[in-house]
Amino acid sequence: MAIQKPSHTLAKIHLKALHTKSLHILFSLSFTMFINMFCFAQELPKPKKPIKPETVTDSTVINVDSLLTKPQNIKEVDSIKNDTLPKKKETLAGIVNYKAKDYVRLNQRKNRTTLYNEAAVDYTDMNIKAGVIVIDHGKNLVYAGRLKDSLGIYSQAPVFTQGPSVIEPDSIIFNTVTKKALVFNSKTEQSGGTIIAETTKMENDSTLFIKNGRFTTSENLDDPEYYFLMRTAKVVPGVKVVTGLTNLFIYDVPTPIGLPFAYFPMTKKQTSGVIMPTPGQDLGNDRGYFLQNGGYYFAISDYLDLAVLGDYYTNGSYGLRLESNYAMRYRFRGNVSFRYENLINSERGFPDFRKSTIYNIRWSHSQDGKSNPNSRFSASVNLGSSRFFQQSINQLNLSNTQNNTLASSVSYSKTFQGEPQVNMNVTATHSQNTNTEQINMTLPTFQGSVGRMFPFAPKSGTKKGIIQNINFQYNVRAENRIQTTDSLFFKSEMFDDAKLGAVHSIPVSTNFKVFNYFSMSANASFEENWTFNTIRRFYDETNEEIVTQDLKQFDRFFTYNFSTSIGTTVYGMFDFEKEGKDPKIKKIRHVMRPSISYNINPAFDEYYDTFEIVDADGTTADEVRREQYTRFEGSIFGIPNRTFSSSMGISLSNNFEAKVRDKDSTATEPKKVMLLNNLNLSTSYNFAGDSLQWSPLRVSGGTTLLKDKMNVNFGMVLDPYALDNNNRKVNTFNVDNGGSLFRLTSANLNISYSISSKEFDGSGGGDDEAAIEESLRSGGRADDLFGKPQDFADKRLTDDDKGKKEEEKAELYNYKIPWNLRLAYAVNYSNAARQNAISNNSLMFSGDVELSPRWSVGVSSGYDFVNKGFTQTQFRFERDLLSWRMNFSWVPFGPFNSWNFFIGIKSSLLKDLKYDKRRQRDQQL
């Protein structure tokens, strides 16, 4: 309802307060404030001459219309043109804007304005929204409250905003002059939590003084499942909270968990602080009681942080963990992690006493592709003790215990634009076998290349023919290769057997069409091999043994080879459509890509030397007189060919697709279905060989089934030659020896299948991306078939928001049960020497089911059909307790049997309020 305006329509009125000593002028001043509160747009017409305030009497009655005309009893004083008295500061510092949905009522007698239904008032940095707002102009007060309907139900609770502070009370009284407020039953959001207070006094700087306040992170503010009762508290929004006696209530039931007084820093910025440790007892080993994951967090800057965490056990064992994250927007981001553990088993003096140290270093760095298109730096490092993931007593990633390798790579690449283009790459790599503890490293690998050049290509247009397509380029690769063991890692001895070498290559090639349907290519490669590791071999007559000396000197050799290939693509179509019939399978398309290649590798005998083996009596041995060797056996890029090779390679790749009738009757085109994604066959024949000229036939293939949810890959090796009685291959075809055309020497089959309920009803079933990322960083799998990484207390691998709606969470019964299932089957067959054995035959599975909106269970396990037993098994149970969470993880058997129970608050603000109980795995000798 709009306000009735005076006869002289004015949108806004700005009046300056008149200085007076009489009560009548005070009343006029109050009404002036009332007019100011309404913020009309135009100004009153100014009197032509100054007004003398002293002449005004109390009998004057001023109403809205009287403000538009000059009062009769006010005399004009011409002698005072400029008032020498200092001007009084305006009562209001800004314009007051207001609105209401139903009506705005003006009460001149009480000097009040009432705004009803969806009322709002804006004044400087203050905003009030409520069901009803009453403005008392005389007392400079604003009252805001709720609306009450005929059933006694309240609605439209006030929302008071002043600067960064937002309060949602039942009612509020605000002074527009002092900017102080008295708030009843308020709800204030503070850094992720909510403070619910019976009475709150707010100062003009937004400081809150609270009586009987409740602090909680619950989303149900009307009935929070838990809260901290603060008898008295002072809150500086975004800065701090200082409280007196406070203790924890769970569903209004008091608990002994509390503090006599407390200070909580409150900020939305990244700040440094103490990380509370998790206490417990090592039940699996004799390490006693412990404190884990305690330390300090350093908020170094907006681009860099550091967490220093430590573990301590009462038997003397300890651990240290450093974790740092860094990021520069639009440039790069990464993280670094270092873990060190000093482990003590049993007690000193006992026979089973053992002391060991393990460590692990991880580094991940990625660069934004747009930051520098011509230069790129990346890193993925995972190195350390070979048995770290198996022996660590504070390990959150169960799946890493099954890793056999640790791999690292740090690379920098640079592209120099021009004609031709030049590319450079420097890489340091690391590969570590955790079973054999062998480590292979390249520190570094340098690769350079000059872009492909076409010397006979036309300056414009396309290249045609064998001559115009001739091209060549230059490549260089240099390595410093190190092979060492875990015990010598990071020691000077690891460089003793380092090998250094380089290879320069110039490939020359061309391609052209033959008979319009065949693509033919010809290639020649010229290589110069440099090495700094050569050998000298001779026969020691004194000791009657062959001696090999390692020579640290530079040497080189030059090789070349030639090759050519021809191939084509053949398309075949099987059409099953006939007039008057609509078969389910309409067409099958078969694509074949045959290819034949020919290679020539000359023999380079000039790089081979001979030595004689002599008997002790000085005569030359009858059986073995000479033995050949090459001094380049220590070269890291291979040795020159000793024998001439002239071979032909044959390969055939196949692809099968079908068009079937679509189940959707409205579809106008048949549906394409992949029958066999690939089926590859390859073999070769050596023309220069004396025996065993045919190489085994290798067959591989793969396809997808069940709407691309199942991946099937298979392979086999078929040997055409037979075996003798000693299971050695002989130069006789197997079919000529009474066998089949080919002899199956090995085969493998891998099947993976993934399905979830969202494929049927659109409900959940997704994987935890943070857990997958943690597994991949440590060299693990991208699934949870070997178990899921979990650290409930740290919460780095969990995600509170799983995409559920609050309405779904509130349900007690899940009529749609989200679930997911992953299966992996692998089988390997070996028969190279008539062993006819299945070396591996296992089925791995993992899945999760939400039994109710707040209950979920999961399992990861498998079965080994060869060893007839279950593989590593993990059970997972999770209960969503609204603001709390409860988790239980259990590995029931095996070398890593353990369990972990956790219950704590979800919010990161109070994540230190938790109970975490673990049983470590048994001691491994």
Image (cartoon, rainbow, N blue to C red):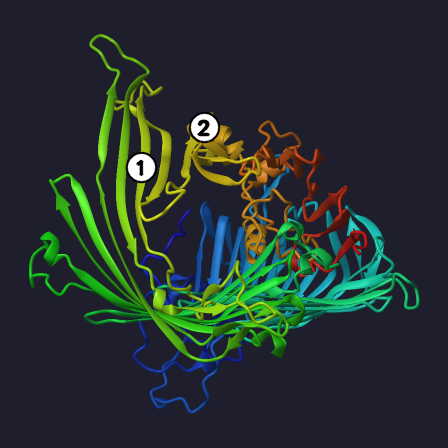
Q: Residue at left 75%, top 55%? A: 914
Q: CA distance from mark 2 to mark 1?
A: 27 Å
The quadrant in which residue 706 appears is top left
Q: Residue at left 31%, top 37%? A: 652
Q: Is residue 260 above or below residue 184?
A: below
- State if disc 1 and disc 2 touch (CB < 8 Å): no
Mark closer to the observer (2, 1)? 1
Identify the mark nearer the N-term, 2 or 1. Answer: 1
Q: Position of residue 51 (x, y in %)?
A: 39, 81
Q: Position of residue 646 (x, y in %)?
A: 30, 50
Q: What residue type is disc 2 on? A: Leu
Q: Is residue 342 visible?
A: no
Q: What residue type is disc 1 on? A: Leu
Q: Position of residue 481 (x, y in %)?
A: 49, 70
Residue assigned mark 2? 706
Q: How busy is the neighbourhood of tag 2: few (under 14 within 10 Å), some, or many (20 plus)?
A: few
Q: Secondary structure at mark 2?
A: loop
Considering depth in this image, is 421 or 468 the residue closer to the camera? 468
Q: How busy is the neighbourhood of tag 1: few (under 14 within 10 Å), some, or many (20 plus)?
A: some
Q: Is residue 631 above or below residue 794?
A: below
Residue 429, label in figure: none
Q: Residue at left 50%, top 33%? A: 758
Q: Secondary structure at mark 1?
A: strand
Q: Is residue 36 left or right of residue 510?
A: right
Q: Position of residue 549 (x, y in %)?
A: 54, 75
Considering depth in this image, is 474 or 903 the residue closer to the camera? 474
Q: Quadrant of the C terminus?
A: bottom right
Q: Is residue 12 left or right of residue 551?
A: left
Residue assigned mark 1? 652
Q: Is residue 342 left or right of residue 539?
A: right
